[in-house]
Every structure is written in C-alpha cells, then in structure tokens.
Image (cartoon, rainbow, N blue to C red):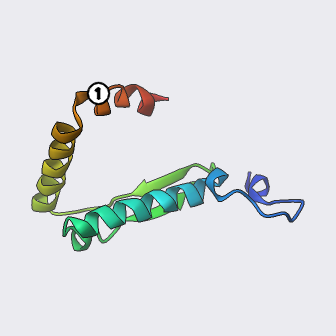
Amino acid sequence: MASELIDPDGEGSDASADPWFEAREAVLDLRDVLKAAGLARQFPYLQADVNAFGNGFVTLGRTTPKAAKRLAELLKAAREAMGEAAFAGREREEER
C-alpha cells in the first residue's frame, strides 16, 4: 500500500527500505558499469520502477545482439576472474 511508504513521524525514511530507491540504486550501479564498458548507449531503456504492488524493478529494456553478446562476455570474464564460488548459489537466492 502506498501509505506504507510515507513516514508518518516526519523523521525521514530509510531510502534503502524503499523499493523504488533500492531499484534506482541498482540502476545507477549498473549504469556506471555499462558506461565503463562502453555499453551505455546500447541500453537506452535502463530504468528503475515500482509496480502496483510496491515491488521495485530494474528494466534493462531492448538492446542489440552485439551489445547482449558483449555483456555476456563481460559476465563470463567476471565469473572466471572471481571464481565459481562468487557465483555459487545465485539461482537459489533469485527464487526467493
């Protein structure tokens, strides 16, 4: 409910507890990495949003096959550099 996001005491809210701010922070982090990789223009629809149920979402949007392949290469390189342990269990976390 939208009223749950309003701070009734007027003391300020914790941005990390707000789904939109959490999504926005993730978008900014991803934007910075995409810019560093030279892919910023290939993800023009990158945005933070909240659905009708108050869940935060990150929309990557459409991109070119070339940009998707480049992103896959970067993720693969990160996995190789960080090791399998860094990526272990991620599927289970996302199912929650």
Give x and y (percent) for residue 55. Answer: 58, 49
The residue depicted at 29 percent of the width and 27 percent of the height is: 85
Q: Position of residue 37 (x, y in %)?
A: 20, 64
Seen from the viewer's position, the closer of residues 46 and 88 is 88
Q: Quadrant of residue 94?
A: top left
Q: Is residue 30 above or below residue 89?
A: below
For residue 5, side relative to residue 59 (left or right): right
Q: Residue at x 63, y 48 (%)?
A: 53
Residue depicted at 43% across the width and 65% down the height: 28
Q: Residue at x 65, y 59 (%)?
A: 15
Q: Is residue 88 above or below residue 34?
A: above
54 lies left or right of 64: right
Counting labels gives 1
The residue type indicated by label 1 comes to: Ala
- Left/right placement of residue 82 relative to residue 18 reads left
Q: Residues within 10 Å of mark 1 (few under 14, many from 20)?
A: few
Judged from the image, the secondary structure of the residue bearing numbered disc 1 is helix
- What is the x, y in percent for residue 71? 19, 54
Between 35 and 57, the residue placed more toward the observer is 35
On screen, residue 43 versus residue 96, left or right, reads left
Q: Nearer the viewer, residue 19 or 16?
A: 16
Of residues 37 and 71, the one drawn nearer to the viewer in this rendering: 37
Residue matched to label 1? 85
> Residue 23: percent from the left, percent from the top?
51, 56
Q: Is residue 74 above or below residue 38?
A: above
Q: What residue occupies the far right of the structure in this picture? A: 9
